[in-house]
Image (cartoon, rainbow, N blue to C red):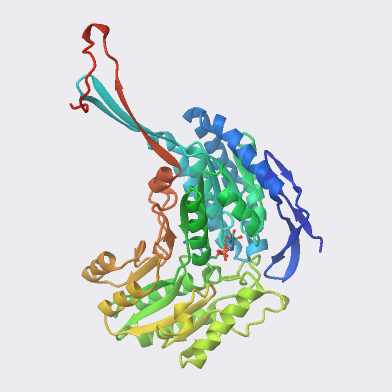
Amino acid sequence: MTIKTIPHFLNGEETSGLGEKTQPVFNPATGEQTGALCLADRQDLETAVAAAKKASESWGDISLAKRTAVLFKFRELVATHKGELAAIITAEHGKVLSDAKGEVERGLDVVEFACGIPQLLKGEYSDQASTGIDVFSFRQPVGVVVGITPFNFPVMVPLWMAPMAIATGNTFILKPSHKVPSAALMLADLWRQAGLPEGVFQVLHGNREIISGLLTHPDVDAVSFVGSTPVAKHITEVATAHGKRVQALGGAKNHAIVLPDADLDHAADHLAAAAFGSAGQRCMAISVAVAVGDAADLLVKKVEERARAVKVKNGTEADADMGPVISPESKAFIVKTITEAEQAGAAMVVDGRDLVVPGHEKGFWVGPTVIDHVNSEMSAYTEEIFGPVLVVVRVESLEAGISLINANPYGNGTAIFTTNGAAARKFQREVQVGMVGVNVPIPVPVAYHSFGGWKASLFGDQHIYGPEGVSFYTRGKVITQRWPEPAHASGASYNFPSN
Ligand code: NAD
């Protein structure tokens, strides 16, 4: 197997940079090393920031018509190359091809939203706010934006950020996850083909020291981060202490409440898909089923049937439902957490710890796992497992379910399965979570609404993409304007101006 070198994309071209170190990249389905990722040194970082700063002066000034022309072309290119992008995702992440294509499509939604940027940057105007005075406001780019992204969405999460930052007139340096770095380079090439000037979109790979250099650099103005909660918190603390605007989306533990009146087949189908799709490595995956009262026994039986039917294979195979997890470390953590639940007295309904995929013995596999009678003390409940594990917590009432969710430190996504509108309405109003699904297990908002969790799932004030994304990547400016006619000069007044 040849091991490809994975470069940076700086100032309009791919480069290995000056850093001498590399980091291995693996195919999780085979366990083989496929790439050697170039790691930046300080000089590469300076090159990237200087290019971004220089490019921001002209890109921030270019007409909206020219900016949107590039965005429309980029949209076409991503759509045309969807299959290739999906193949790159599957090769480094492991998710099945159809899921990888779905990820690209959700990213495209944000590109399409960004194509409408002239409408979103129109500003506001107050005629004759005071006698002879007009007031108007508009928004300008913040400057140089850094995006730091997680392994689980190598295309979608960068597309939550870059099109919005670029459409609003900023330049963007992407630090992709070191586990899945190649898709970022294809995005860079597509931006180049779309006519984006050099330095507006760059890709820089690096270790923590380089990330820290970006977070503290005087010429970086804003940081968008998506990843785990401890890192999100750290990024927020460091970057805000250095005067940057920060939005940092963190981890999750998403609960779905199932009421006894729900259509249990519908609920079981969607719970299984939301728990085991992408091997549970989605920030909006459902990892806790909260079964209310009489729903529990039948629901567990139906979810068990579905879990046993999941086809776990190399994601390149046409009939695969689920691929591997990202790394041996991730597998070890998932297996350890399942074992702890078993030892603490939970009931193993489906156990994926010993799964072997024939022909792929060295891959990082964990099969779908369902654990019943889990309580809120067990590590299987308190930890974000980030694997194909669904735990079932049994409660007596909707109120008890809502209390359980509200006591959880995370607040990314949640769902309720019911046929009772009043119960759904109570849930959506009382639950302390940013994104809520009613009979929809993974309520990722469409691109014209913004995406964001509450509590430990988001640090910063603004959600990502959509209208809040526009706001995050721009600063408001208000102009108060008078054009006095010489004949009406009124002389100096030393009072505080009044209307
Ligand atoms: P991670 O936090 O380990 O890494 C995210 C990014 O931060 C990567 O680019 C990584 O290189 C970098 N990084 C890691 N450690 C760092 C450190 N100490 N200092 C600076 N940078 C560091 O996350 P991951 O394992 O790649 O992704 C999975 C996590 O992301 C899960 O917790 C998942 O819930 C979360 N996630 C959240 C959302 C959301 O929208 N809230 C979306 C996707 C993923």
Residue 302 is situated, as x and y percent measured from the top left of the image, at 42, 82
The C terminus lies in quadrant: top left
Q: Is residue 145 visible?
A: yes
Apparent side of residue 491 relative to residue 156 in the rendered image (left or right):
left
* Residue that lies at the very extreme toward the top in this rendered image: 487
**At 75% across and 52% down in the image, what residue appears?**
19
Residue 393 is situated, as x and y percent measured from the top left of the image, at 38, 83
In this view, 447 is above or below 316: above
Q: Quadrant of residue 470?
A: top left
**At 25% across and 64% down in the image, what residue appears?**
429
The N terminus lies in quadrant: bottom right
Q: Quadrant of residue 413?
A: bottom left
Residue 83 is situated, as x and y percent measured from the top left of the image, at 62, 53
In this view, 237 is above or below 71: below
Q: Quadrant of residue 451?
A: bottom left
Q: Is residue 352 visible?
A: no
Number of marks: 0
* Residue that lies at the very extreme toward the front in this rendered image: 494
**At 41% across and 39% down in the image, what residue appears?**
475
Residue 57 is situated, as x and y percent measured from the top left of the image, at 55, 31
Q: Quadrant of ligand 1?
A: bottom right
* Residue that lies at the very extreme toward the left in this rendered image: 499
Apparent side of residue 444 relative to residue 146 in the rendered image (left or right):
left
169 vs 240, nearest the viewer: 240
61 vs 46, nearest the viewer: 46
